[in-house]
């Protein structure tokens, strides 16, 4: 994985602006710690930071190729998992390659097929290709939105980058946030409206979209969308196809010229990836697969089963590792580690995020990076196969709001009443919910209950899954670790999207279809273990630490947070001896301690980014 940034300008001579381009590119150094590269012409300036995974000698960027009298230059962040297939087809069409990088294959695919090349790609990507002869820039983002890409247009100037910080490094971009941006942070956060960049005038290219910018202006096209159609396969055939697609996706994503490992929680998703990877390693005579899990000091003492976390992971992790004969590494963090890294996590996102759920992942990835460069993780299986509680609870299905943000009213009590009146949280969230719900591709003749679940899946794809993918990308890339997500293979998503609910929940258990498809790959105890989310700390010391940190911040008269919050209510919450939330205010994990930590991150963000509220 890498970091990309660029600047197109119809007025300035960009060959003289290398210092600004260098500054923009430098902000992405953590994404690409191994190398940097630049390409400048009067109208275009492109910067790249590289994390070397494939073809160390031949995959440097920016990469340029000529076709006739045209020169094409690419900067690319991602991985193609069908590189070999594309290369064979391109060679049959007369193209030659100097190396074996997917970058060269991607650029050649664009030269051969133009924007239509996107339909052929299997991978995670965000890239830009500059056509020097036509003075045009083509940008594209993968179907699922695994890799990020932000952009802004200011007069005759167009800027883009992998992260917000790259755009903010340009002298013409100010860290301004208007009322809508505030609503994104206060109401929806840590989620974000698809395409919204929070900072005034900044947008994110949506998943499955491409953008063309030239002298005629900017045009955005959607090249991929879920298609609703009747599912014709019986259960046996469906199970067989899911098994093939999952195994194939995992095997494709093991390709690397650097060491690969897997995240292992002991749940069905990560265990399945680990099982396929371990078998592949064994068949190829490679070294024992390394696996990693995360835990927290004294979590075994303080863990209490609940609706969202029925059991602890630690015993299951070791069981699966022993069963698959992996070389396992358990990484344990203490409360001070989580609090101290809240700042780094906010900087990695460029926004307040999922508090210790983010910071723990950053610390985890940083430790893994000491030995590995690539990891595989089980994200997105719950969104695709229906693993979350809100897929199964009739009340969640029938409530006209995002089920992972159902406690929004309780969250808003910490903000200043006049600010709440300004951003109108209920109205803002309802509008965003309705926009996405209305876009759900219908299936004529579907039962009302099946249509409700289809809408729930659509909401999860475009919202909750995006939040988790953003978390995984920013925290891992901030540590210089590439994390791949096999369940995000678009072939799996397209097929399972139309599988009816009774098949997805076969054997009367969540993700029953996936579990049945993995028969023989994992032991029965693991296959039918009830879902448990990403592990968080249950140490009461964490609540004490973030409470004290937040109280110290709001006691500082210079804190920019004071303009946004209701100090009296926050002090009242802080005075309680225990967590005041009976249910999470976001997702499955974020309760009282995470709300305090979210406010800490908001204070850090306002200060460090010098945010100006319009």
Image (tube, rainbow, N blue to C red):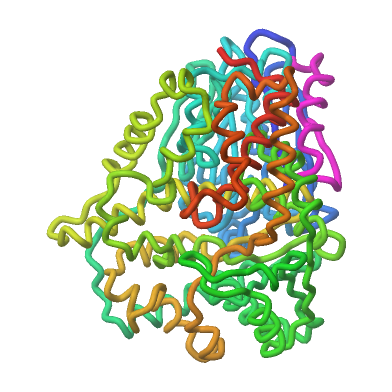
Q: Is residue 126 visible?
A: no
Left of 331 or right of it: where is 7?
Answer: left
Q: In which quarter of the image is the C terminus?
A: top right
The part of the image, by quadrant, that contains residue 506 is bottom left
Could you tell me residue 544's position as x and y percent? Answer: 71, 48
Could you tell me residue 552's position as x and y percent? Answer: 75, 32
Viewer-closest of 523 and 186: 186
Marker count (numbered) = 0
Viewer-closest of 369 and 562: 562
Left of 442 or right of it: where is 327?
Answer: right
Q: Can residue 440 be seen in this view?
A: yes
The residue depicted at 64 percent of the width and 53 percent of the height is: 357
Give, as a single range, the part of the protein colored magenta: 14-38
Could you tell me residue 376's position as x and y percent? Answer: 66, 66
The residue depicted at 82 percent of the width and 36 percent of the height is: 37
Could you tell me residue 69's position as x and y percent? Answer: 65, 30
**Residue 24 falls inside the magenta stretch:** yes
**Residue 232 falls inside the magenta stretch:** no
The residue depicted at 54 percent of the width and 21 percent of the height is: 214
The residue depicted at 39 percent of the width and 25 percent of the height is: 424
């Amino acid at each position: 994985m890498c970091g990309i940034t660029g600047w197109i300008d119809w007025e300035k001579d960009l060959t003289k602006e290398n210092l600004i381009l260098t500054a923009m590119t430098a902000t992405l150094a953590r994404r690409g710690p191994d190398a940097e590269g630049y390409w400048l012409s009067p109208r275009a300036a492109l910067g790249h930071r590289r994390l070397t995974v494939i073809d160390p000698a031949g995959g440097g960027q920016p990469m340029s190729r000529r076709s006739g009298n045209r020169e094409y230059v690419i900067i690319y962040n991602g991985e193609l998992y069908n590189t070999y297939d594309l290369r064979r087809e391109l060679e049959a069409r007369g193209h030659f390659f100097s190396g074996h990088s997917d970058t060269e294959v991607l650029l050649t695919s664009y030269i051969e097929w133009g924007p239509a090349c996107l339909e052929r790609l299997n991978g995670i990507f965000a890239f830009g290709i500059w056509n020097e002869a036509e003075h045009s820039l083509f940008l594209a983002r993968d179907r699922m939105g695994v890799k990020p890409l932000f952009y802004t247009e200011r007069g005759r100037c167009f800027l883009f980058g992998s992260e917000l910080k790259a755009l903010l490094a340009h002298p013409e971009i100010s860290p301004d946030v208007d009322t809508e941006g505030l609503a994104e942070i206060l109401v929806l956060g840590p989620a974000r409206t698809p395409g919204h960049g929070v900072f005034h005038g900044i947008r994110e290219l949506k998943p499955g979209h491409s953008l063309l910018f030239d002298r005629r202006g900017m045009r955005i096209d959607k090249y991929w969308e879920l298609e609703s159609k009747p599912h014709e396969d019986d259960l046996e055939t469906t199970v067989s196809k899911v098994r093939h697609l999952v195994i194939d996706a995992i095997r494709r994503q093991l390709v690397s010229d650097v060491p690969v490992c897997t995240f292992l929680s002991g749940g069905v998703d990560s265990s399945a990836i680990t099982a396929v990877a371990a078998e592949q390693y064994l068949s190829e005579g490679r070294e024992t697969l390394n696996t990693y899990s995360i835990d927290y000091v004294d979590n075994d003492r303080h863990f209490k089963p609940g609706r969202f976390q029925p059991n602890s992971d630690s015993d299951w992790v070791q069981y699966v590792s022993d069963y698959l004969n992996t070389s396992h590494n358990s990484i344990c963090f203490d409360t001070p580690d989580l609090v101290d890294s809240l700042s780094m996590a906010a900087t990695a996102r460029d926004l307040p995020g999922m508090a210790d759920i983010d910071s723990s992942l950053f610390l985890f990835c940083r430790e893994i990076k000491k030995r590995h460069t690539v990891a595989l993780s089980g994200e997105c299986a719950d969104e695709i196969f229906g693993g979350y509680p809100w897929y199964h609870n009739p009340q969640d299905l029938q409530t006209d709001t995002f089920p992972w943000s159902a406690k929004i009213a309780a969250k808003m009590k910490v903000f200043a009443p006049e600010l709440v009146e300004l951003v109108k949280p209920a109205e803002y969230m309802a509008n965003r919910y309705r926009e996405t719900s209305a876009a759900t591709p219908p299936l004529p003749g579907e039962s009302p209950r099946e249509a409700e679940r289809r809408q729930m899946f659509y909401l999860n794809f475009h919202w909750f899954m995006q939040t988790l993918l953003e978390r995984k990308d920013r925290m891992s890339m901030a540590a210089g670790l590439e994390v791949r997500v096999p369940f995000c293979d678009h072939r799996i998503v397209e097929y399972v999207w139309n599988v009816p609910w009774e098949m997805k929940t076969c054997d009367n258990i969540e993700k029953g279809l996936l579990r049945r498809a993995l028969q023989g790959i994992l032991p029965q105890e693991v296959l039918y273990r009830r879902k448990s989310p990403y592990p968080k700390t249950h140490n009461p010391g964490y609540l004490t630490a973030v409470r004290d940190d937040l109280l110290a911040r709001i006691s500082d008269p210079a804190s920019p947070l004071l303009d946004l919050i209701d100090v009296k209510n926050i002090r009242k919450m802080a005075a309680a001896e225990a967590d005041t939330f009976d249910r999470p205010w976001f997702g499955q994990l974020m309760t009282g301690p995470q709300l305090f930590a979210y406010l800490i991150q908001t204070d850090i963000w306002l200060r460090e980014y010098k945010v100006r509220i319009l």
